[in-house]
Image (spheres, rainbow, N blue to C red):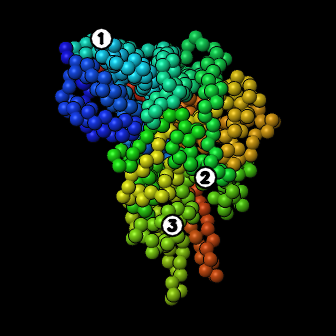
Amino acid sequence: MKRLFQHFTYMFLAAMLLVSGACNKDLLNKKPLNDYRDEDVWKDPALVVAYVNNLYLQMRHGFNEVMISSISDESRFIHNYETQTVVTEALSPDALGAIGTQFGEWEKHYRAIRNCNIFFEMVDKVPFTDQAQKDRLTGEVHFMRAYFYHMLVKFWGGVPLVKQPFSLEDRAAMLIPRASFKECVDFIVEDCDKAISILPVRHEQPGRATKYAAHALKSRILLFAASPLFTDPIEKQPFTWYEGVSAEDRYKKALAAAQAIIDSNVFTLYKPTSNPVDNYTRVFLDKDNSEIIYSRYFNRQFQGTSHDKFNGPNGYHNWGGNVPLENFVSGYQMNDGTPFSWANTAHAAKPYVNRDPRFYATILYHGAKWKKRPSDAIALDPVGEIQTARWEKKNDQGVVSVVNGLDTRSSAIENWNGTYTGYYLRKFMDINLDAQFFLGDQAWPWFRYAEILLNAAEAHIELGEYDKARPLINQIRTRAGMPALDNSVTGDALRQAYRYERRYELAFEEHRYHDVRRWKIGETAFSGPANAIDIMGKLNPDNSLTWTYKVVNSGQDRVFSEKHYLAPIMATEIRRNKDVLQNPKYPK
């Protein structure tokens, strides 16, 4: 049976070619690609390149309207979009909420995997005149298949391993059971190793996979596999258990994968200035900097990112989006490395003073200096300062009234996109972009060197090698303007210091949700109220204001149960395939 080529339009292809830096006028003059059957595609190397380009577009980046941070303790998505389902007991095989529609995307990833398998089946039939091009494309598809599988495994544990492209007539053959967790990890690592053996260190076209992108993916999945969730599972099932490998060997494998990147000396932490706030901000704005291992690129004209519009304050006619929780903000240390506490009267009087410098590069809080207001708001705020509080104001007749800030849900500018928590996201934002009218071109950092240092540090800690872990953590802390950990920090204290560093260094980069689950700390981290800050300015006799800060529930109570450590397999999938068994604690 002739296999129809995966549909994608000229617009899709042109966008990808632009992002990757490619330009091929002859290719763009061909007839529409959805008119091509497989025998046409695999006779034309240019169309095979387009096929692989389309696979890149199926890799999920983090600049989506709903961020995975909003099903963790980092943020709340103000428009819901089924995130409420995930953070409560409503999560079930019949209702996966945002895990099904936004993040896990079981069916989408299996379609992408099928397209990878079709490539491997057909690539040797393509009349390539450039063997290096064929090899590079093959390496890229190995990397992408590993990436798609790692996305599935992070949500569900062991999943069906599909290694060949089934036709629509092969329905019985498609009904395969879940592979063991170890088999899935081994397969991902195998694909990564194949990619590593083929791909170049650098690529002339930005956005294409490299040798070190594959190394980084290998590092990530091996650390995930070594974690308590799969070594001490809630139920010992093959698809929930990393069976047959000792704890020491698991972490040694994870360490070796990270160490391969560190020893290459190709990447360094990015420090373009002497200001730690600017340095951390620019990691995510300066393209191709020394820290970035692999990114998704965007072009403002054809395929820009709407991150700023999705998450900017409503007082700038943006959409609010994924608003940081007080639960997350309270965790930022003071800049001397001591904990912040609302019970400390000095901290509570000035909560946004002298915090970890990364706080100022990540969070927009009341009083934070921001960009110029739009034309209909600039008269109300000529400075460009975030207003998420309310305060008393006396008019000329001495009558006191309460003014609501321009970025609250009672804003005089726009009230429907306001924050529920008193905060907005600052990270990844371009302060020079008018997001009301224009798209951004920030690159999404799939892998960066800071993660690799942290991966290696975690493995060293779990191997008891504290003196090797500490310098890696301190590289990141000192870049951030935080004091280094001294040699007295060992054992569980070092583990907790490391987890702080991972939480705040990698904030909003799609790590926290998976980290909490793999560490098995979800009942504490993800349960309870999603907190906000209520800020009030009381008028003094001299017309100055005294600010008070009160931690309140944003209106969302969260529940994390033991079963939530793995997402439920969709009921429709189990009904379709009786050999796919359900994850523990969910209805069978």
Q: Nearer the viewer, residue 553 or 83?
A: 83
Q: Can residue 246 be seen in this view?
A: yes
CA neighbours of label 2 inside 10 A, class few (<14), some (14 to 19), many (20+): some
Amino acid type indicated by mark 2: Asp
Q: Which of 566 and 451 is in front in this view?
A: 451
The residue at 39%/25% (across/down) is: 569
Q: Are marks 3 and 2 in contact (CB under 8 Å)?
A: no
Q: Please state if 80 lies on the left or on the right of 348 as rendered.
A: left
Q: In which quarter of the image is residue 6?
A: top left
Q: Please state if 263 lies on the left or on the right of 73 as rendered.
A: right
Tell me which label, 3 or 2, sits earlier in the chain. 2
**Residue 260: percent from the left, percent from the top?**
62, 23
Mark 2 highlights which residue? 278
Depth check, mark 1 against mark 2: the one in front is 2
Relative height, residue 521 to residue 325 (above, below): above
Q: Which residue lies furthest to the bottom in this view?
A: 397
Numbered disc 2: secondary structure: helix
Mark 3 highlights which residue? 384
Depth check, mark 1 against mark 3: the one in front is 3
Q: Do the residues labelled 1 and 3 touch (CB within 8 Å)?
A: no
The N terminus lies in which quarter of the figure?
Answer: top left
Amino acid type indicated by mark 1: Ala
Q: Nearer the viewer, residue 117 or 531?
A: 117
Tell me which label, 1 or 3, sits earlier in the chain. 1
**Residue 405: percent from the left, percent from the top?**
49, 67
Numbered disc 1: secondary structure: helix
Tell me which label, 1 or 2, sits earlier in the chain. 1
Measure how far apart labels 1 and 2 are at the Cα level. Answer: 55 Å
CA neighbours of label 3 inside 10 A, class few (<14), some (14 to 19), many (20+): some
Mark 1 highlights which residue? 173
**Residue 526: percent from the left, percent from the top?**
54, 40
The residue at 63%/21% (across/down) is: 256
